[in-house]
Amino acid sequence: MNSILHSSLWFSIVVQVITGIIELLALVVKTAPGMALIKQLLGLEVAVQAVEGAFYVWLYNNIHTVKNITPKRYADWALTTPTMLVTLIAYLIYLNDSGDRKSLSLLQILRENAVPIAQIVGLNWLMLLFGYLGEVGVIPIVAGVALGFAPFIAYFYIIYERFIVNANNTDNINTDTSMKIYAYFLVFWSLYGIVAVLPYTLKNTIYNVLDLFSKNFFGLFLSYLIVSSATASSATASSATASSATASSATTTSV
């Protein structure tokens, strides 16, 4: 079983490196001004990848010397989960924005939504605290999980109520996308609490896989949006150039 845990660590590091390269390449892709916020969010996801990657390299090198690696994960999660929540919220705001997306910025979103974001991040840290106390034996692990689910449900409810239900979005497509992204986060993050009560080796093996889906997915998704936007802009520009050349040729011929 330990060999499976070791292999899952190695696999996770390889996937993280590949994902990180893709995201860094996407950051330098030239896009329309309306994609500025998406690039900022991808920058946050790259930071998440960096923290995750550093932790997993440490984990790989210390897996046989550290008796219990699970509590160490909370140092990673304390940094990365609030960042991912900010990214999720900002993207939901981006989807529901009916105005000029060119003016949207991460700093503006943080400033205008400081109170709910602070509430969400605070509840997230409270969830992690309960989980950590369970892992180090201060409270029973089952109690830590049960207590942790209370703030977890609370902050996901705030996200749903504030940034989906009350977003004043009349576009059904964007609302549907918002719900899908929200549901993805909700489902995969809730699995951490369920996995927490499993035996040590199985738990950490599954955590290695869950981290890939919860942390790497959204960065790849944002990279896809950036590349797709750049491709569409390039195709539009090429079409416009071809049309202009055709019109110019027709004018010359008629003369």
Image (cartoon, rainbow, N blue to C red):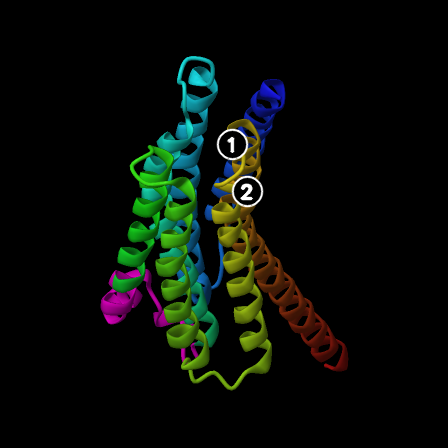
Main secondary structure of the magenta stretch: helix
Which sits in the foreground, 255 or 23?
23
Horizontal relation, residue 150 to residue 188: left or right:
left
Label 2 CA crowd tier, 10 Å (few <14, some 14–19, many 20+): some
Which of the numbered marks, if any, corresponds to residue 204?
1
Residue ranking furthest to the top = 65
Q: CA distance from mark 1 to mark 2?
A: 10 Å
Tell me if residue 160 comes above or below residue 197 in the rendering: below
Residue 93 in the image: state x and y as whole percent: 41, 71
Q: Position of residue 163 (x, y in %)?
A: 40, 73
Q: Amino acid at mark 2?
A: Leu
Which amino acid, mark 1?
Asn
Looking at the rendered image, the quarter that the N terminus falls into is top right
Q: In the rendered structure, does residue 46 fall within the stretch colored magenta?
A: no
The numbered mark at residue 25 is none
Q: Is residue 165 above or below residue 28?
A: below
- Whether residue 170 is visible, yes or no, is yes
Toward which corner of the image does residue 230 lie, by quadrant? bottom right
How many marks overall? 2
Label 1 vs 2, first from the N-terminus: 1
Q: Nearer the viewer, residue 250 or 215?
A: 215
Q: Secondary structure at mark 1?
A: helix
Residue 26 percent location from the top left of the image: 51, 47
What secondary structure is marked by label 2? helix
The residue that disc 2 covers is 210
Decide which of 160, 108 is in the foreground and name it: 160
Image-based side of 43 in relation to 230, left or right = left
Q: Which segment is the magenta one?
A: 97-118
Tell me if I can see residue 25 in this picture.
no
